[in-house]
Amino acid sequence: MNSTVPTLTVIVPTYKGADRLPHLLRSLDAQTLPRSRFEVVFVQNGPDDGSLGLLDDWACASDIRTRVLSVPDAGAGRARNVGLSNARCDVITFIDDDDWIEPRYLEVGLAAYAKDAVVFMPIKDANDGGITGANSINTRRAMIAGGTSPLGDSPWILGFNACKFLPASILRNYRYNVDLRSGEDVAFFANLLRHPQLQLVTPAATDDAAYIRQVRADSVSRRTESFSFSVEGRLDVIEALQQIEVPKEHDNARKSLERAQFNFVADYLARHPEDSSRAVDLAVARGLTGLPWPHKESGSCETLVFAFCFPPFADPSANVVAKRLATQRQVVDVVSADMTPVRRIDHSSAVLVDPWVRKHVVVDEYPAFSSWDQIARFAQRAVRPAKKTYSTVYSRALWSGSHVAGCLYKLKNPNAVWEAEFSDPLRLDATGEDREGPLTKGRVTTKLERAVANAGWSHLLIPNHFALTEIATFILADTLTFSNQNQVDEVLGRYELRFQDAVKRKVRVSPQPIPPDAAYSARPITLDLDPDRFNIGYFGNFYANRGLGDYAHALGAIPEPDRPSLHVFSNADAPAGMDMPGAHLHPTLDYLEFLNALTQFDALLVVDTETSGTRYAKNPFLPSKYSDYKGSGVPIWAMVEPGSSLDCKGLEYASTLGSVEEAQSVLRRLVGLQR
Amino acid sequence: MKLRSTEPRHLQSGPAKVAVDDLSRPYDLSFFESGSVFSENVEKLRIENTDWPVGVNLDAQTLANLWAVASSAGCDRMRYWVNTDGVARLTTVVQSLDVLAINGVSPMGEWVVFDLAPATTTDGSSEVFLSGFLTSQQLMQPAQSIASPVSRAADQTGGRAALLTELVHKAKPLKPYLPSLVIHAGYKVLGALR
């Protein structure tokens, strides 16, 4: 069909359609479009109920070019895919086997077709009461009839298979997702939004040219609501939609399709609020963001979070806050810093917090770690938008701006219950010395110093803002959360006993939360792992003078055929020693990809921060990735400093840092797991 | 797989039983006639002795299974369709399946179609042919994504031209060391592809 005028392929999927097809066949015979201009491809799917014979007989008797193909497995999407693969013409239209078309439908539709056009025809509903053109699609169509407009302006026409004439050159590149139980048409047609040049042509003169839709009780809009259909099925479709990359000008069009799907979810959850958490888990497992969860909109939000580091910025501290919110399952408002100048964007971690963050204010202030003026400005600006009074406040540091904001809020709202969480010692650096943090005068300095003085602890102050923030937080917060007891001992041990006693009453030790199970499958990633090797994963910077050295020595104890592969994920340059056999260096992953990657290894390696030779008597650091590792269910090899928090976990596969013998023993046992 | 002939064959009209690796891939299968059956599952095709069994981008194991089902039904021929998506699999397919011989090679749209028949003792080696496709495996990697929605046909032609170039480049250094029969067969393959 290489004529200069466009030709049309009509694709008809049919499933047990013997009783329904005759109506459609008669309507095809009655078409006014010349036979040379179109072909019909029937794709019978599932068991044959006599449809094949019926169609073969009709094809023999008809002068319409017809092919009758079949697919043994039932499924309209699968059948349409075979139809798409077999289409020979320039334009494609779909007709369901229980529907039919008016005599001029193909003629008018094809006449209106032009290059890069999607032709949109009218639709009528057939039911027991007869045929009517009064339906919502026609009402909306009437508003654009007779015109041509960008396809992206009318995304709603992508929500159904019927009454469209589509360019085959574009459509042939896409296929229906046969894994979707419903809504596969939306996911399929949304691919058209990838093509910004497409125009929607809506003919005005359409007498005798409508698509007749047989209205059935089980059509999507009439389907009985259930968790499976209204939530699970819709989230599947939204996942498919979010995977379609569209040009910026079509972003809103795609989002409107997502919203239309999510309306089913919202309606269902409005009637079944007890299923909200389950629905959120499914959304997280699919890596979905940007959904208007009803539980966020209804009721009041009682908790304010000050998190200097917060998704979408790639930072371990941001990830820990994300995990906290995901495990607490409580709607919060968040104030965070704009870390664009110092951190890359990682949209994946937003998946965890998206269902729980109602309002998110990003403070436009340079994200300073140690410049007090900027930290103080951040805190002032962080508190300002929090006009509402919250009953609880949560802040997390490092970076200290979170706690400074917490102090200011608590001073202004003393009845608010404030939990301040510490990831690492705030005032002390990696060697146990006071961090350098010159204090400058200003309103924030005055407020915090006055709070400390009012509590009777002004003699503890030194001209250091990290010290001021730590002391003020200890005094003002209602709960102080540390990741491990060593940290409590080391941090409080620097203060006089009386102050320690006053603070200890508020202390809570809580390891970093384990991500929800769903997070480990939210962003699947393909790793190039040798299935015949024992694969060990390490995530983070690797220092040759500790972990890697132990590993390299341990490797010598393993016969070559059994030697494992070590995969290091780090943005740092290849550390010395990475040229050892079986070592592979990879760039860091987005957080949810990282979680998924964890599950693919045979073992995961975590190495303690070494504190020997520092002022720390006990190792106060607990690697944040330990909780991520733990949630993966994969054996963990911990290279520990004696007495560290990690050491105290009593892990099955632990070796003392610097002990080659222990490292060899652990590696032998791990590799033995494979056998 | 053995090599008997690389002559282009006339592709029969009439229905076929088509085993496809993935029906969700945007393949052009519009050459098949009315009555054809498509499935990802060989057993579900219900092949009979009058059928034309066709494998589309199948891996070696599934193609072997298709042949087992087809030959037990009484078929003595089979076709194997490969496009850029299946080139990587073709390597293994040609290296294995010694019970079959290539009895014709025909280009068709985005596809290269192999006529397959039961191998006999007079069939030759497919080594040169395989060598070319081993190279093409690397060559075709970037083309695996269906990138251009606008002009697939142009891409197909370009892909085959690139494949030819690489085949010639790969085979030339081997030429002085190969028997003339093999060289002759190699030229036939190139001719068919061209």
Image: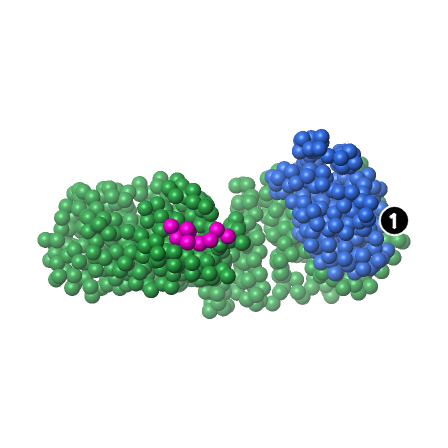
Indicate how the structure is coloured in the image. by chain
Kind of residue sitting beneath label 1: Asp
Quadrant of the rendered structure where residue A666 is? bottom left
Which x, y percent locates residue A59? 86, 53
Task: Name the residue tied to disc 1.
Answer: A63
Does the magenta portion include A554? yes
The answer to which of A376 and A511 lies nearer the viewer is A511
Residue A383: in sight, yes or no?
no
Chain ID at mark 1: A
Between B37 and A179, the residue placed more toward the observer is: B37
A332 horizontally vs A73: left or right: left
Q: Residue furthest right?
A: A61
Magenta highlight range: A553-561
Chain coloured green in this rendering:
A
Residue A129 shows in this picture:
yes
Q: Secondary structure at mark 1?
A: loop
Q: Position of residue B161 (x, y in %)?
A: 70, 33
* Residue at the spot 53% in from the left edge and 46% down from the top edge: A252
The image shows residue A364 at horizontal and vertical percentages of 33, 43
Examine the image and state in which quarter residue A478 appears. Answer: bottom left
Q: Please tell me which residue is depicted at 25% across the width and 56% down the height of the picture.
A: A619
Residue A163 x %, y %: 70, 50
Callout count: 1
Residue B152 placement, left or right of A32 = left
Residue at 66% across, 38% down: B136
Quadrant location of the N terminus of chain A?
Answer: top right
The residue shown at (18%, 54%) is A471
- Please check the rendered image and state whether residue A631 is part of the magenta-colored stretch, yes or no: no
Left or right: residue A470 versus residue B160 is left
Name the residue nearer the viewer: B66 or A396. B66
Q: Which chain is blue?
A: B
Crowding at dot 1, Cα within 10 Å, few <14 / some 14-19 / many 20+, comes out as: few
